Image (cartoon, coloured by chain):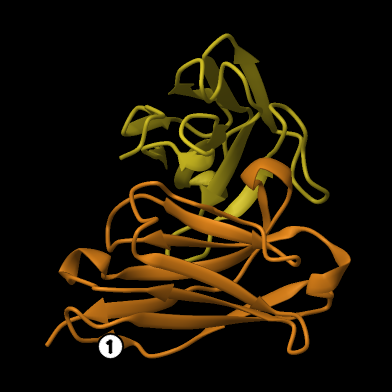
Chain colours: A orange, B yellow
């Protein structure tokens, strides 16, 4: 059974960089699929952040592209998200997911709340 | 930023049928498959329908998806209290360098 678990700081200061890691178990990242990040501000809808293939190929949401970096570490079976210059608007539950072709997310982590506040 | 439009809410009595619409454009729904996600309160989203009308293993066949042109629909038949949740459509958008876009979301209430 594929399982994903997000980890990282729950509180980030404005203007700093948000960093999260997703650890995958039950499936080797190197075996295929894309691996993605999605977020959901409190009380609002879902927003796709981006995804990465094990080879390093990435797709990013155009509205976040200038601030986002997604990377993969196949040796640890993990992938990571960095979002720079955060503001209160980046406060959200961040989910990691296994992604099929064209964005279909078939396995999701439980999500982790990241609050941007001084 | 969502370019897929859904009604904010729909409600129906138990055992009835409800449909949720999702309206997009030629760059997303018109040219790519539509997927649907169910998000129960306080939980992570769950893939409900993919590639327009396919059900992942374990998903009840009370759920069905369809697409026509630049619009798609999710139907839930035999509505049950456990179906009360938020539902999101999603599709790949070919504009710019390509990205995935979610719908605005629909809250389903079982009366």
Q: Please provide percent x and percent y for residue B108.
A: 42, 39
Crowding near the residue tagged with mark 1, few <14, some 14–19, many ≥20 C-alpha atoms within 10 Å: some
Looking at the image, which residue sits at the far top? B69
Q: In the image, is B5 to the left or to the right of A91? A: right
Splitting the image into 4 quarters, where does residue A85 fall?
bottom left
Q: Residue at x 62, y 16 (%)?
A: B67
Q: Is residue B109 visible?
A: yes
Q: How many marks?
A: 1
Q: Chain of mark 1?
A: A
Quadrant of the image containing the N terminus of chain A:
bottom right
Splitting the image into 4 quarters, where does residue A13 fall?
bottom left
Q: Is residue A1 visible?
A: no
Q: In the image, is B31 to the left or to the right of B108? A: right
Task: Report the residue marked by disc 1.
Answer: A11
Q: Please provide percent x and percent y for residue B11.
A: 39, 31
Q: Secondary structure at mark 1?
A: strand
Is A67 above or below relative to A77?
Answer: above
Q: Please provide percent x and percent y for residue B42.
A: 43, 66
Q: Please provide percent x and percent y for residue A25.
A: 77, 81
Q: Residue at x 47, y 40 (%)?
A: B101
Looking at the image, which residue sits at the far right? A31
Q: In the image, is A47 to the left or to the right of A101? A: left
Pick the front one: B6 or B75: B6
Q: Residue at x 77, y 33 (%)?
A: B54
Q: Residue at x 63, y 28 (%)?
A: B77
Splitting the image into 4 quarters, where does residue A107 fall?
bottom right
Quadrant of the image containing the C terminus of chain A:
bottom left
């Amino acid at each position: 059974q594929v399982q994903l678990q997000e980890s990282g700081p729950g509180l980030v200061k404005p203007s700093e960089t948000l960093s999260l890691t997703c650890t995958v178990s039950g499936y080797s990242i190197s075996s295929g699929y894309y691996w993605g990040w999605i977020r959901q501000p409190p009380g609002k809808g879902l927003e796709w952040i981006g995804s990465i293939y094990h080879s390093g190929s990435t797709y990013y949401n155009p509205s976040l592209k200038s601030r986002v970096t997604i990377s993969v570490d196949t040796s640890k079976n993990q992938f990571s998200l960095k979002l720079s210059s955060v503001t209160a608007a980046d406060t959200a539950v961040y989910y990691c997911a296994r992604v099929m072709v064209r964005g279909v997310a078939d396995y999701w982590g439980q999500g982790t709340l990241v609050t941007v506040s001084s | 930023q969502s370019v897929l439009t859904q009604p904010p809410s729909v409600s129906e009595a138990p055992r009835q049928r409800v449909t949720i619409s999702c309206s997009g454009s030629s760059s997303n729904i018109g040219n790519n498959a539509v997927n649907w996600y169910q998000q129960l309160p306080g939980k992570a989203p769950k893939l409900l329908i993919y590639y327009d009308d396919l059900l992942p293993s374990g998903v009840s066949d009370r759920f069905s998806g369809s697409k026509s042109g630049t619009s798609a629909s999710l139907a839930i038949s035999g509505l049950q209290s456990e179906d009360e949740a938020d539902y999101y459509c999603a599709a790949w958008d070919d504009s710019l360098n390509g990205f995935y876009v979610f719908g605005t979301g629909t809250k389903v209430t079982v009366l």
